[in-house]
Amino acid sequence: MRLLATYSNIVLLVVCMLGLMVLGACGAQDEGESSKANETSRMDTTIIGGRTGGAWSVFTEGIAESIRREYEDAIITVEPGGIVENSPTVDVGNISYGLSYAMTAFAAYSGTEPYDQPYESIRAVSVVIPANYYQFIMREDSGYNSLDDIVENQVPLRLAVDQKGSAGEIITRNILQQYGVTYEDIISWGGSVDHLGDSKAFELMKDKRIDATGDAVSVPSSNIIEASTTMDLTLLDLKQETIQAVSEELGMVSGTIPSGSYDFLGRDIDTVNTPAILLVHKDVSEAEVYQVTQAIYKNLDYLGTVHEEFSHLTDENIMDVGSVPLHPGAAKFFKEQGLTD
């Protein structure tokens, strides 16, 4: 009996030791799988914004830093881009994220000017900058206070617009079309139309070789502020019927630039505007886009310290991305916050 009991104890001890070994192995396997899962979910991506040194590069870096703040192991690279180029770049999957105007993004999604084909793989994440206002700015000594005056008097206007197919150029051309005016008409009046960037346009305005320029930019615009230190400037209103027609044509909305936005601006200016939004390729995982959306939403206070325009981002406008569909990851986050049905 004593031998049998001893044998039983030995068998029990062996079974227990084997059990502990199995549990240890399972634990190690679980730990390995968990580590592998964490490694898989680590974010390593790129966001394209605007020209180096411009406001859009600041916006893009602010978004990138918001993600890094929420996910310390995330690797977020920021690269320069362009408002028109970013949508196709994201669509083909070369880069996962990019900034764009809502109006430009929808033009890309639907294949309208300036695009010759639809880019249907882009999706929206959120609004980044709620409003970029179209600003038609003139030298004050031109003596004209409205587009109506310019058109009615067939003024030989020396106009600077951005490169053909850019957002600002399309808006300017569309506004003129509402008056039945083309670039060729302006030239026939003795004026000129030059495709120039903001810096060059303001340089020539200072030298009195350009009278006016127009673009959709944030308010206040650093370029306009700088230009106003070397010459007297004025902003022109758009008529309500022009605002409505342009908004319907280009997918924009009406907006008002408040008096005092610039030192030289003593009255409100009615115009059109479009938000800047963050785009993503549709095949980026729902989990990652959820994290990106969450990072932006949770860091609104921080973003307000990066650029004043971020301070206008609220629960009420963060989803106003226009007509490009929301990515499911973003839609899921906004729904959880009670911002959408």
Image: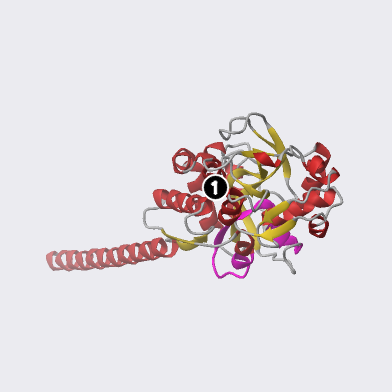
With 309 as the anchor, is 322 left or right in this view?
Answer: right
Which image quarter is the C terminus in? top right
The percent coordinates of residue 237 (x first, y second) are 73, 38
Label total for image: 1
Does the magenta run of residues contain 92? Answer: yes
Q: Nearer the viewer, residue 48 or 239?
A: 239
**First to last magenta residue range:** 88-112
Q: Find residue 253 and report its image quarter.
A: top right
Q: Find residue 279 and report its image quarter.
A: bottom right
The percent coordinates of residue 161 (x first, y second) are 68, 56
The percent coordinates of residue 11 (x first, y second) are 21, 68
Q: Secondary structure at mark 1?
A: helix
Can I make out residue 146 in this image? yes
Extreme left residue here?
A: 2
With 3 as the anchor, is 32 left or right in this view?
Answer: right
Q: Find residue 146 and report its image quarter.
A: top right
Q: Is residue 339 above or below residue 112?
A: above
Report crowding for label 1: few under 14, some 14 to 19, many 20 or more residues within 10 A (C-alpha). some
Q: Is residue 3 above or below residue 172?
A: below
Q: Nearer the viewer, residue 176 or 19?
A: 176
Q: Is residue 5 above or below residue 71?
A: below
- Residue placed under numbered mark 1 in the picture: 223
Which image quarter is the N terminus in? bottom left
Q: How is the image coloured?
A: secondary structure
Q: Nearer the viewer, residue 108 or 15?
A: 108
Does the magenta run of residues contain 233? Answer: no
Q: Nearer the viewer, residue 193 or 10?
A: 193
Residue found 48% across the figure and 43% down from its top? 307
Residue type at mark 1 is Asn
Can I make out residue 285 in this image? no
The percent coordinates of residue 158 (x first, y second) are 71, 53
